[in-house]
Each structure stands twice: as C-alpha cells, then as structure tokens.
Image (spheres, grey):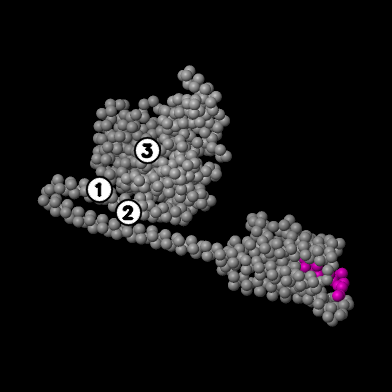
Amino acid sequence: MEYVICEDNSILLNLYSIIIQNEIDTLKNNDSILLSTNNPHEVLNVIKAEPEQPRVYLLDIEFSNSVMKGIQIAERIRRVDRVSKIIFISNHSELIRFTVTSQVEAFDYIDKSLGLEMLEKRLKADVKAVSEFSGASPEIFQYRVGDKENQVEVKKIDFIETIKNSKKVQLHTSGSIISFNSNLKEIVLQLPMLYRLNRSCLVNLDNVEKVDLIESKLLFDNGNYLKISYAKGVQIKFLLSRK
Amino acid sequence: MIRIDPNVGQILDVFAILLFFVLLVRQTEEFRNKKNFIIVLCSTIMISYIDLKFNFASLILLPLIYFLFFRIKSIGFEKNLEYLVKPLLLSIISTNISGLLLIDFFSRIKRIDTLSSNGFVIGNVFLTIVIILIFKGLLHRVFQYIERYIDSWSRRLVVYAAAIEVSLLVIILTITRLLRTDTRILANTIIFFTVTLLILTVVFAVMVTLRFSKIESENEKKRISETSMYLAELEENYKELQKFKHDYRNLLISVQSLADDGNINKINQLLTEAMHAERKSVSTNKSLQLKNMGDGAVKGLLLNKYFEGSEKNIKLKIEISEKIPDLGNYTMLTCRVLGILLDNSLDAVADTCSKKINIAFVRMRTDVEVIISNVFDNADRLDINRIYDRGYTTKGKNRGLGLSNVREIINSTDNMFISVSVDHNVFTVTITITNVLHD
C-alpha cells in the first residue's frame, strides 16, 4: 500500500518518513511512500485524484492553525473510502483517543508525548501490521449499528444467532460478541457460505475445529463453542469430512 | 313548594345555554369567528327546542357540540377539556344557585303571577351574572395565591377533577330533573358537592406539588454535595498544575545554567526526566472531563463512580470530547447499564496493577457510543462465550449477574446495542444508543 504522511512540523515529518521508509525496506514488500507533506490540502488532492485507492494515512491531529484538521481529513477520507488505514499522531495525550478512533475507525492512535522511542516502536509495528494486511484483500461482512457502518472479516465470524424477542442478531467472533439490527434471511443473502444450523443460527463451518457428539457441541478454533442437537452434530461431521 | 311557569323555565334554559357559550368564547380568541357565531345561534335554538321535550338534553348536548365544532385540534385534549369544563361548571353552578335562591325568595313572598314571572327572569339573569363575577373574582384570588404551588402536572389534575365534577353534576341534575325531586335538596346537594370537590382538588394538587418539590430539593442537596466534591477535585488539580508550573520554571533555570556550562549530557538526562514528569501530571489533571456531559443523571453517575474509584485507588479516565446532550428517554436505561458495567470494571481492575478504567462518550451523527474498557488479570480464564450467562464471573460466587442483566436491559429496547470484545487482556464494552441526537 502507499503511504501518505501529513504533519506540519517539518522535522517530525522527515522523521516519520525515515522511520517508515526504513521499516518498508527491512520488510522488503511493495509498499512505498506516495506523499509526505506539511500541507493538508495536498492530502485532499491525493484523495480527490484517486478516491478509492486504499492507502495508509499518517495524520497529525493538530495543525498549528487549526486544531481538528487531522480529523477533518480523516472524515473526508472515510466519506469515499472505508478500506484505507488511518494512523493518528497527536500530543493530545490520549484525551480524544476513543473519540477519533471510533468516529473515523482509526487504525492506530499514537501519543507523541510518550517520547520518540515509543513513537518509533509504534510506527514500526503499524507498518508491519499494514504489510500483513496488504496481501489479498480479505472478504468483508458489513453491518450497521445505528448510523455507523462497521465491518468484520468473514473468516473471523464463528456464528451468528438471533436474539429472542428482539429484532437484533448477535455475531460471535473469536474475541467479540456484537449485536446489531438484522435478520438471518438478509445475512444469508450476504454470506451464502454460512451453514444454516436452524431457524435462529448461522455457522461458519470453516472455523469449526471439532464436533463434540458426546456433549452435543460445536467447538471452534479459538475456544468458542455452540450447543447443537445430536442429529445436527452428525450432519455437520459428515459435511466437514467431505471438505 | 312553588311551581314555575314552564315558559319561564324555558327562557331561563335559553339564557343558561347562551351563558355557557358566552363564557366559552370569552376564553380565547380562536373561538370568536363567524362560523362559531352561527353555530352558537343554531345550537341554542336547537337545544332549547329539544329541551322542551326532554328537560335534561341541554346538559348532554352542550359538551357534544363543543367537541363537534369548537375543539381546537392543535392544542391537545387536555387544554380542550379545560376550555369546555370551565364555562360548563361555572354556568351550571351559577344558574342553579341563582335559580334556587330566587325560588326560595319568591316562595317566601308567595306571589307567583305574570309580573313576578318577569321579575323572576330578570332577577335570575342579574343574580347569575353577579354569582359568576363573585366566583371568578374568588377563583382568581385563590389561584393567584396558590399559583406558585401549581405546576403543569397538578394543573392537569385540577382539569381532570373538574371534568369529573362536571360529569357527576350533569348526572345528578339529570336524575333530579327526571325524578322531579324537591329543589331544596337539590340545591344543598349541588352546592355542598361542588364546594367540597373543588376544595379537595386544590388541596390535593397543592399537596402533591409540595411533595414533589421536597423530592426535588433532596435531589438538589445530593447534587450540591456531588458538585462540591467535584470542585474539591478541581481545586486539587489546580494545585497540581501550579506545582507543575513551578517545577517547570525551576527546570528551565537549571537547563539554562547547564547550557551555559555546555553540559549536553546532563541536559538530555534532565529533559527525559521532565518528559516523564509531564506525562504523569497531565494525566492527573485531565482525567475528569465532564463539562461536555449534558445529561445530568449520567454526569452524576460518572462522578459517583469516579469518586468510588478514587477511594479504591482506581483511576477512571473519562473522555467526552464533544457535547453529549440530555439522553431523554434513554437516561434511565443508560444509567442502569453504565452503573452495572462500571461496578464490574471497578471489581475487575481492583486486583490488577494498572488500576485504570477508560470511559468514552463518542458522538456519532445521530448516535452516542459509550465505550468502557479495562485491563483484567486472568486473561486465559475469561471465556467470552459464557460472558452473558447468568452467574458467569471470574470473581467467585454471587458476582456474575451484571452482564446478563445489561444484555437484558439493552435487548428490551430496539434502539440500544451492545458489543463486547476481548483483546489480549483488555476487555471492552461498547454501548450504542441510536437516534438520540438530531443533526
């Protein structure tokens, strides 16, 4: 992926560029720095020119003349592009970390005041994480909570079940349980690869590690489990053995 | 006992109906238009004609006509009821009282002929108007005095009570007219009935309002004590800041002296130390960021938990960087959910070394997102699969009712959502309250 860096302090700007370039060189992948600037308008121009190109944006949150500039740029990016990674750098000492990460789905939020050493470490880790992402773009499942569009990688979904007496469903991944408004009919259309266990549950069989017929449980790779009927267990065991 | 000439009764009935309409249209300008004027004329003629056949018809027809033609749609049922009940009550009471007084007077002088019939009519009209004026003046005085005890709630109570009174009066009058009871008994009943009920209503309304204001003042006291705690905390922070500023000056002076000596190494060391010190003091100064919380109840809860945390040496870092307005219908639910979640977090971090809970209120376009995250100790023992199970806890017995309750509360409403996640040893709960903001 291409990196776009924006920071109004030119010394820091150079520093970020050097850190990132070094890390890219050590990782020896196809990533590169597209733009490194202290003018936010140049970043906007890049977005306008090729809006859907996935990139990594490294943005300073506060510019000397306008405090929230970095967030505004991020909002502009998110309006046209939901895939790009946004990394914020700030010396707000974590005061608005949750706000910005949640509002524009930031990839990381680095606190400048932690010192240069820490900053370098975090940046390097981010570059590495990004390079792992930039392989084949993963299949994404999108869902809405209120007016916010969220996404989760399909391969991370273990199962989706309805919640009794409500219009909501509950999505289980290895480390999270998320609820949102939807129904299984709609989800099946989006995710035809899921197995319909019964009227209230869809299962991602790719993540099933084992069928426990004695306890009547589906065990997933990461320790999640789901209670099922014996008959379904036999059926799923058969399906898995054919794969 | 005397009998009144039926014609006299008829004329007085027409007068009563007209009186009602006059009192009605006097209340608001919206009633005073051509259409209503014609309706008044037509219905007066019509009702008095029907009254000839059924003596009690007017009492039932007047409210009916009001709701058919006069009702103002834009002001809601209660206000309309008020507009109807006031003139109805006033006209019924005043005409009845004046009629009864006059009957009493005439039966004493024992002269009923054509002349005295005219006198009866004129006397009745005159007396009715006098009674209305007295009533109005009296009510005005009374309400002027008790107005400060009456809020919109008790006002509504009075209106409803008055409506019930009117209906009861109408029923009693209808029955007595049907039964042709002695007018004297009727008179006593009506007067007694009305006065008692009115007094009872007003007393009741005032009592209820007083009770409410007492509750309010208790809440106020609690709020004040919380505010003073908050102020103390602010003061503490301010002192900290002063100290920090002082230290900073000293630091600058020492750096300058070192620079004069050209001791770069020493300067470097000093600056690194200063960096650490700054981080510490900044974090203590700004952890309580509550000025943007516009919902009083939620703010109170956050403050409460903040102090509960500080007693246990736990730092609650509250991030509200954009104004969060009053959550309206969701205030109660949010408080309940937040209370449980924060208790859980306080429990969870008590044994950890970080002792920090992050709380953030994030403004989305029409939603508010509440994020609570904390580090927990037994990473390998937290089973996210069972997190919503009743009784599941990593903290021993009798503890694990929290999250299952939270989920129950949230799933009882369509506009709130919860997601939980565990990443390494950080546990995060995100509550989304949708459609509470208006953009």
Residue A208, by quadrant, is top left
Report how far apart the C-alphas of labels 3 and 1 lie in the structure.
29 Å
Q: Earlier in the sequence, mark 3 or mark 1?
A: 1
Pair 3/1: label in front: 3
Q: Which residue is mark 2?
A: B285
| Residues at marks 1 and 2 touching, judged by CB atoms closer than 8 Å | no
Which secondary structure, mark 3?
helix
Q: Which residue is mark 3?
A: B379
Residue B297: percent from left, percent from top:
47, 55
Is the N terminus of chain A in the top left, top right, bottom left or bottom right quadrant?
Answer: top left
Residue found farthest to the left: B261
Which chain does the numbered disc 3 sit on?
B
Which residue lies at the image location 84% right of the left edge and 67% below the top edge?
Answer: B180
Residue found farthest to the bottom: B109
Horizontally, residue B344 falls left or right of residue B170, namely left
Which residue lies at the image location 43% right of the left edge and 51% below the top edge?
Answer: B323
Residue type at mark 2 is Asn
Q: Is residue A111 above or below residue B53?
A: above
Residue type at mark 1 is His
Q: Which residue is mark 1?
A: B276
Range of magenta residues: B1-17
User: Is B6 included in the stretch rendered in magenta?
Assistant: yes
Report how far apart the C-alphas of labels 3 and 2 lie in the structure.
31 Å
Residue B203: percent from left, percent from top:
62, 68
